[in-house]
Image (cartoon, rainbow, N blue to C red):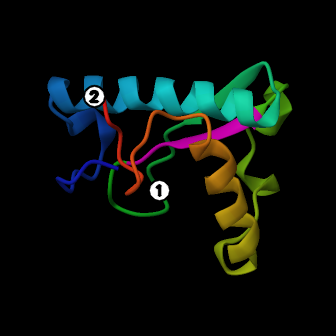
Amino acid sequence: VPIEQVDKWTDLDAETWLHISGVAQEIGEAIKTAYGTTRTGFIIAGFDVPHTHIHLFPTEKMAEFDFTKAMAMDATDPKAMDEAAVRIRQHLNTGEDGYRLS
């Protein structure tokens, strides 16, 4: 999520879009490694919140690109989310604070 609040990803300046895409590639590779999948899904929905953000998820098939199968925010298990974050961070070049070093 960029710091600047931009409602639609198509309104982002080119430099921010390139940065988001590059970071998504790095996180996508970490997700593939952490979950042992051959692909990482990348979706920009743009309807949940009026702020540009992307969704990345481990996947093996196109059928998994379906938000109706995603957990509702109020049903998300915080412990499971924390465990997923730890699992993914193990495969990223990050510092103690979780921010990229490179």
Q: Is residue 21 left or right of residue 12?
A: right
Residue type (three-letter) at the residue carrying disc 1: Phe
Q: Is residue 89 left or right of residue 34?
A: left
Q: Which disc is residue 19 wearing?
A: 2
Q: Which residues are magenta?
A: 53-58
Q: Is residue 87 within the magenta segment?
A: no
Q: Where is 9 relative to 18, above or below?
A: below
Image spot of residue 78 (x, y percent):
68, 75
Q: Is residue 54 within the magenta segment?
A: yes
Q: Where is 80 relative to 42, above or below?
A: below
**Secondary structure mostly taken by the magenta-highlighted segment of the chain:** strand
The answer to whether any part of residue 46 appears in the image is yes
Residue 25 or residue 49, whichever sits in front:
25
Pointer 1: what residue?
47
Q: Which disc is residue 58 wearing?
A: none
Q: Which picture quadrant has residue 28?
A: top right
Q: CA distance from mark 2 to mark 1?
A: 22 Å
Q: Residue at x 52, y 35 (%)?
A: 92
Q: Residue at x 73, y 74 (%)?
A: 79
